[in-house]
Protein backbone atom coordinates (compact mmCIF):
# COMPACT_ATOMS: atom_id res chain seq x y z
CA UNK A 1 0.00 0.00 0.00
CA UNK A 2 1.28 3.45 -0.90
CA UNK A 3 1.77 6.07 1.81
CA UNK A 4 -0.79 8.88 2.00
CA UNK A 5 1.83 11.51 1.20
CA UNK A 6 5.49 12.33 1.78
CA UNK A 7 6.96 15.07 3.94
CA UNK A 8 10.43 16.62 3.94
CA UNK A 9 11.64 17.60 7.40
CA UNK A 10 14.34 20.26 7.06
CA UNK A 11 16.15 21.42 10.20
CA UNK A 12 19.20 23.32 8.96
CA UNK A 13 20.30 26.11 11.30
CA UNK A 14 22.33 29.19 10.46
CA UNK A 15 21.91 30.59 13.98
CA UNK A 16 20.72 29.11 17.27
CA UNK A 17 20.42 25.32 17.19
CA UNK A 18 17.56 24.09 19.37
CA UNK A 19 18.22 21.02 21.49
CA UNK A 20 14.63 19.97 20.76
CA UNK A 21 15.34 19.27 17.07
CA UNK A 22 16.18 15.55 17.52
CA UNK A 23 12.99 15.06 19.56
CA UNK A 24 11.04 16.88 16.84
CA UNK A 25 12.47 14.71 14.07
CA UNK A 26 11.67 11.53 15.99
CA UNK A 27 8.16 12.77 16.80
CA UNK A 28 7.36 13.50 13.16
CA UNK A 29 8.72 10.10 12.16
CA UNK A 30 6.36 8.49 14.69
CA UNK A 31 3.47 10.57 13.36
CA UNK A 32 4.34 9.25 9.92
CA UNK A 33 4.15 5.70 11.20
CA UNK A 34 0.87 6.39 12.99
CA UNK A 35 -0.81 8.16 10.08
CA UNK A 36 0.88 6.39 7.17
CA UNK A 37 2.87 9.19 5.57
CA UNK A 38 6.51 9.19 4.53
CA UNK A 39 9.12 11.28 6.35
CA UNK A 40 12.55 12.21 5.04
CA UNK A 41 14.79 14.31 7.27
CA UNK A 42 17.89 16.26 6.30
CA UNK A 43 19.85 19.41 7.11
CA UNK A 44 21.54 19.40 3.69
CA UNK A 45 19.94 22.04 1.49
CA UNK A 46 22.03 20.97 -1.49
CA UNK A 47 20.44 17.55 -1.34
CA UNK A 48 16.77 18.55 -1.46
CA UNK A 49 16.21 22.22 -2.31
CA UNK A 50 16.01 21.79 -6.06
CA UNK A 51 13.45 21.14 -8.79
CA UNK A 52 14.23 17.41 -8.90
CA UNK A 53 13.76 16.55 -5.22
CA UNK A 54 11.15 18.99 -3.89
CA UNK A 55 8.28 17.70 -6.09
CA UNK A 56 8.65 14.29 -4.40
CA UNK A 57 7.13 15.80 -1.25
CA UNK A 58 3.65 17.13 -0.61
CA UNK A 59 4.84 19.29 2.30
CA UNK A 60 8.11 20.71 3.59
CA UNK A 61 8.56 21.17 7.35
CA UNK A 62 11.02 23.82 8.55
CA UNK A 63 11.68 22.33 12.00
CA UNK A 64 13.20 25.00 14.26
CA UNK A 65 15.35 26.34 11.45
CA UNK A 66 17.25 29.58 12.14
CA UNK A 67 19.22 32.15 10.21
CA UNK A 68 20.03 32.11 6.50
CA UNK A 69 19.81 28.53 5.28
CA UNK A 70 19.22 28.69 1.50
CA UNK A 71 21.24 30.19 -1.34
CA UNK A 72 19.59 32.09 -4.19
CA UNK A 73 19.18 29.03 -6.42
CA UNK A 74 17.62 27.04 -3.58
CA UNK A 75 15.28 29.92 -2.72
CA UNK A 76 14.06 30.05 -6.32
CA UNK A 77 13.41 26.28 -6.33
CA UNK A 78 11.46 26.52 -3.06
CA UNK A 79 9.35 29.37 -4.45
CA UNK A 80 8.52 27.31 -7.52
CA UNK A 81 7.57 24.40 -5.28
CA UNK A 82 5.09 26.47 -3.26
CA UNK A 83 3.66 28.15 -6.37
CA UNK A 84 3.11 24.71 -7.89
CA UNK A 85 0.85 23.82 -4.96
CA UNK A 86 3.31 22.57 -2.35
CA UNK A 87 2.72 22.74 1.39
CA UNK A 88 4.82 24.48 4.04
CA UNK A 89 4.92 23.83 7.79
CA UNK A 90 6.91 26.14 10.05
CA UNK A 91 7.70 24.99 13.58
CA UNK A 92 8.90 27.27 16.37
CA UNK A 93 11.99 29.18 15.19
CA UNK A 94 11.05 28.93 11.54
CA UNK A 95 9.97 32.50 12.39
CA UNK A 96 13.64 33.40 13.00
CA UNK A 97 14.75 32.12 9.60
CA UNK A 98 15.69 34.00 6.39
CA UNK A 99 14.72 37.35 7.91
CA UNK A 100 16.10 39.19 4.89
CA UNK A 101 13.97 37.24 2.38
CA UNK A 102 10.68 39.11 1.93
CA UNK A 103 8.91 36.29 0.10
CA UNK A 104 9.64 33.74 2.84
CA UNK A 105 8.52 36.15 5.53
CA UNK A 106 5.16 36.56 3.75
CA UNK A 107 4.90 32.78 3.36
CA UNK A 108 5.36 32.33 7.10
CA UNK A 109 3.18 35.33 7.95
CA UNK A 110 4.87 36.96 10.92
CA UNK A 111 8.48 37.03 12.11
CA UNK A 112 10.10 36.63 15.50
CA UNK A 113 10.83 39.77 17.51
CA UNK A 114 11.70 38.68 21.07
CA UNK A 115 10.80 36.26 23.84
CA UNK A 116 10.85 36.23 27.65
CA UNK A 117 12.05 33.28 29.74
CA UNK A 118 10.19 30.00 29.43
CA UNK A 119 6.90 30.18 31.33
CA UNK A 120 3.64 28.38 31.82
CA UNK A 121 0.73 30.36 30.37
CA UNK A 122 -2.83 29.91 29.14
CA UNK A 123 -3.40 29.10 25.49
CA UNK A 124 -6.73 29.95 23.88
CA UNK A 125 -8.29 28.12 20.93
CA UNK A 126 -9.39 30.57 18.25
CA UNK A 127 -10.49 28.02 15.65
CA UNK A 128 -11.55 24.42 16.27
CA UNK A 129 -12.55 23.64 12.70
CA UNK A 130 -9.08 22.87 11.41
CA UNK A 131 -7.16 19.59 11.40
CA UNK A 132 -5.48 18.83 14.72
CA UNK A 133 -7.42 21.34 16.81
CA UNK A 134 -10.13 19.03 18.11
CA UNK A 135 -8.27 17.73 21.19
CA UNK A 136 -7.62 21.11 22.75
CA UNK A 137 -10.04 22.51 25.34
CA UNK A 138 -11.03 26.14 24.86
CA UNK A 139 -8.37 27.26 27.35
CA UNK A 140 -5.48 25.19 28.69
CA UNK A 141 -2.07 25.50 30.33
CA UNK A 142 1.08 25.13 28.26
CA UNK A 143 4.76 25.77 28.98
CA UNK A 144 6.72 27.41 26.20
CA UNK A 145 9.19 30.04 25.08
CA UNK A 146 6.51 32.55 24.08
CA UNK A 147 7.54 34.31 20.91
CA UNK A 148 6.52 37.90 20.36
CA UNK A 149 6.02 38.69 16.68
CA UNK A 150 6.27 41.68 14.43
CA UNK A 151 3.30 42.82 12.33
CA UNK A 152 1.39 40.52 10.01
CA UNK A 153 3.13 40.34 6.64
CA UNK A 154 0.29 38.65 4.79
CA UNK A 155 -3.41 39.55 4.63
CA UNK A 156 -4.69 35.99 4.67
CA UNK A 157 -3.55 34.73 8.08
CA UNK A 158 -6.14 32.76 10.03
CA UNK A 159 -5.30 32.34 13.72
CA UNK A 160 -5.70 28.93 15.36
CA UNK A 161 -4.17 29.50 18.81
CA UNK A 162 -3.40 32.57 20.92
CA UNK A 163 -1.66 33.02 24.25
CA UNK A 164 -3.35 35.01 27.02
CA UNK A 165 -0.72 37.57 28.03
CA UNK A 166 -2.50 38.15 31.35
CA UNK A 167 -1.25 34.71 32.43
CA UNK A 168 2.52 35.28 32.07
CA UNK A 169 5.15 38.02 32.10
CA UNK A 170 5.72 39.04 28.48
CA UNK A 171 8.29 41.76 29.16
CA UNK A 172 11.89 41.12 28.14
CA UNK A 173 15.07 42.65 26.80
CA UNK A 174 16.27 40.17 24.22
CA UNK A 175 19.30 40.72 22.01
CA UNK A 176 19.00 44.48 22.36
CA UNK A 177 15.28 44.31 21.51
CA UNK A 178 12.71 45.28 24.12
CA UNK A 179 9.71 43.00 24.18
CA UNK A 180 6.48 44.05 25.88
CA UNK A 181 4.06 41.52 24.46
CA UNK A 182 1.41 41.97 21.79
CA UNK A 183 -1.61 42.84 23.91
CA UNK A 184 -5.05 41.28 23.70
CA UNK A 185 -4.30 39.50 20.42
CA UNK A 186 -1.12 37.41 20.58
CA UNK A 187 -1.26 34.65 17.93
CA UNK A 188 0.72 31.45 18.40
CA UNK A 189 -0.42 29.32 15.47
CA UNK A 190 -2.00 30.24 12.13
CA UNK A 191 -2.41 29.15 8.53
CA UNK A 192 -2.99 30.64 5.10
CA UNK A 193 -3.25 29.86 1.42
CA UNK A 194 -0.28 31.49 -0.29
CA UNK A 195 0.54 31.87 -3.98
CA UNK A 196 -0.99 28.53 -4.93
CA UNK A 197 0.38 26.64 -1.91
CA UNK A 198 -0.50 26.23 1.75
CA UNK A 199 1.33 27.52 4.84
CA UNK A 200 0.86 26.45 8.47
CA UNK A 201 2.88 27.74 11.41
CA UNK A 202 3.04 26.91 15.11
CA UNK A 203 5.34 28.72 17.54
CA UNK A 204 5.15 25.79 19.94
CA UNK A 205 8.02 23.30 20.10
CA UNK A 206 10.88 24.97 21.96
CA UNK A 207 11.24 22.35 24.69
CA UNK A 208 12.23 18.74 23.91
CA UNK A 209 9.48 17.52 26.22
CA UNK A 210 6.82 19.23 24.12
CA UNK A 211 7.27 16.50 21.51
CA UNK A 212 5.94 13.97 24.03
CA UNK A 213 2.69 15.94 24.50
CA UNK A 214 -0.11 14.15 22.64
CA UNK A 215 -2.13 17.35 22.26
CA UNK A 216 0.76 19.15 20.62
CA UNK A 217 1.57 16.18 18.39
CA UNK A 218 -2.02 16.03 17.17
CA UNK A 219 -1.84 19.79 16.48
CA UNK A 220 1.41 19.31 14.56
CA UNK A 221 -0.02 16.40 12.59
CA UNK A 222 -3.06 18.48 11.71
CA UNK A 223 -0.86 21.20 10.26
CA UNK A 224 1.20 18.68 8.29
CA UNK A 225 -1.95 16.93 7.03
CA UNK A 226 -3.54 20.17 5.87
CA UNK A 227 -0.33 21.49 4.28
CA UNK A 228 0.20 18.21 2.43
CA UNK A 229 -3.35 17.51 1.31
CA UNK A 230 -5.38 20.71 1.56
CA UNK A 231 -8.10 18.74 3.34
CA UNK A 232 -9.95 20.52 6.09
CA UNK A 233 -11.73 19.32 9.23
CA UNK A 234 -14.92 20.23 11.07
CA UNK A 235 -15.12 19.70 14.82
CA UNK A 236 -18.66 21.06 15.04
Image (tube, rainbow, N blue to C red):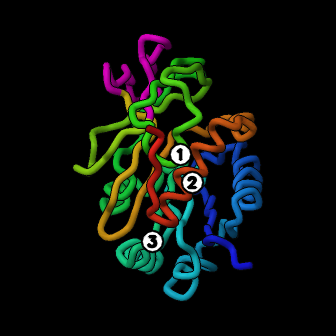
User: From the image, which quarter does the N terminus lie in?
Assistant: bottom right
Is residue 171 on the magenta stretch? yes
Report which residue position mark 3 lands on.
86
Q: In the picture shown, does residue 61 fall above or below 79?
A: above
Whether tag 2 and tag 1 are in contact, CB under 8 A, the answer is yes
Q: In the picture shown, does residue 38 fall above or below 179?
A: below
Q: Is residue 175 visible?
A: no
Q: Is residue 52 visible?
A: yes
Kindly state the secondary structure of the residue where label 3 is placed: loop
Residue occupying image coordinates x 57% and y 22%: 117
N-terminal of the pair, mark 1 or mark 3, is: 3
Please identify the residue farthest to the bottom as the structure is shown. Answer: 52
From the viewer's perspective, is 223 left or right of 150?
A: right
Report which residue position mark 2 lands on.
65
From the viewer's perspective, is 47 left or right of 185?
A: right
Magenta residues (range) = 161-185
Amino acid sequence: MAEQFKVLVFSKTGGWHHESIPAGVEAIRKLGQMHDFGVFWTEDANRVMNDKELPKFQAVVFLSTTGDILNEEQKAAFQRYIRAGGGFVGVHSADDTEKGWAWYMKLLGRMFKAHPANQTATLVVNERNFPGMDRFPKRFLFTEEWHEFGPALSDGLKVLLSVDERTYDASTHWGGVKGQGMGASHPISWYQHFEGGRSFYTALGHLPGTYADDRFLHHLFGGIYWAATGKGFSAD
